[in-house]
Image (cartoon, rainbow, N blue to C red):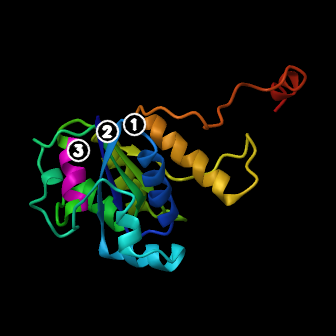
Amino acid sequence: MKKIIVAITGASGAIYGVRLLQALKALPCVQTHLTVSGAGLLTLHHEMHMDRAHLEELADVVHPAHDVGAAIASGSFQCDGMVIAPCSMRTLAAVALGLSDNLVTRAADVTLKERRRLVLMVRETPLNLAHLRNMTSVTEMGGIIFPPVPGFYYPPVSIDDMVGQTVGRVLDMLGLPQEDLQRWSGLPPQQAPLASLR
């Protein structure tokens, strides 16, 4: 049984956190631990018309964001990775500076210090220099900056396709199996010569 921590913060893109929880719930080998910031709940309600109760049904264990005494706040809690989906710039900054001021940022700090996989689905555009420097800091500490940038090579026909493909790539980062991810297999032979001309 793998244990994955999922955090949802107040950036736009609550759908990524929801779809990630749904995908993880479909894997019998995974136990999810969820924590959501207050701004994350606000965004969830605004963007998806979903309340806390319906969100929490998607997780195996729920930890209030103010509970810094929760199990996931300790390095002794054995887990296989953490994803912040979406990750606000405020949360990114707190992780970059080691400010463990709530359970989201404390769990992220613990994930980094224990050398476990931390994936931040940062959501902002355009990016200012503070954002870029914070991303660099987290990367240098071993975190993975994973903006939910859609690919168009497979090609998507709906927003749901784009979200699903992005979540599938996050599952790849966690080393979790999935069957529906569209993977690039190279250009068809007749198009390959054209690629060298670009």
**Magenta range:** 104-112
Q: Can the viewer see residue 40 in this picture?
A: no
The residue type indicated by label 2 comes to Arg
Residue 149 is left or right of residue 2, and the answer is right
Q: Provide the residue designation for mark 1.
A: 174
Mark 2 in CB contact with mark 1 (< 8 angstroms): yes
Above or below 177: residue 7: below
Give the x, y percent position of residue 175. 41, 31
Label 2 crowding class (10 Å Cα cut-off): few <14, some 14-19, many 20+? many
Q: Which image quarter holds the N terminus?
A: top left
Q: Quadrant of the C terminus?
A: top right
Tag 1's secondary structure?
loop
Q: Magenta includes 111?
A: yes
Residues at marks 1 and 3 touching, judged by CB atoms closer than 8 Å: no
Residue shown at 90%/22% (left/top)?
190
Residue 53 quadrant: bottom left
Spatial distance from mark 1 to mark 3, Cα to Cα?
13 Å
- What's the residue at 68%, 30% (across, down)? 184
Q: Which mark is residue 111?
A: 3
Q: Earlier in the sequence, mark 2 or mark 3?
A: 3
Instruction: Name the residue type under label 3.
Output: Thr
Q: Which residue is mark 2?
A: 117
Query: What is the number of the mark on residue 23?
Result: none
For numbered disc 3, what is the local secondary structure? helix
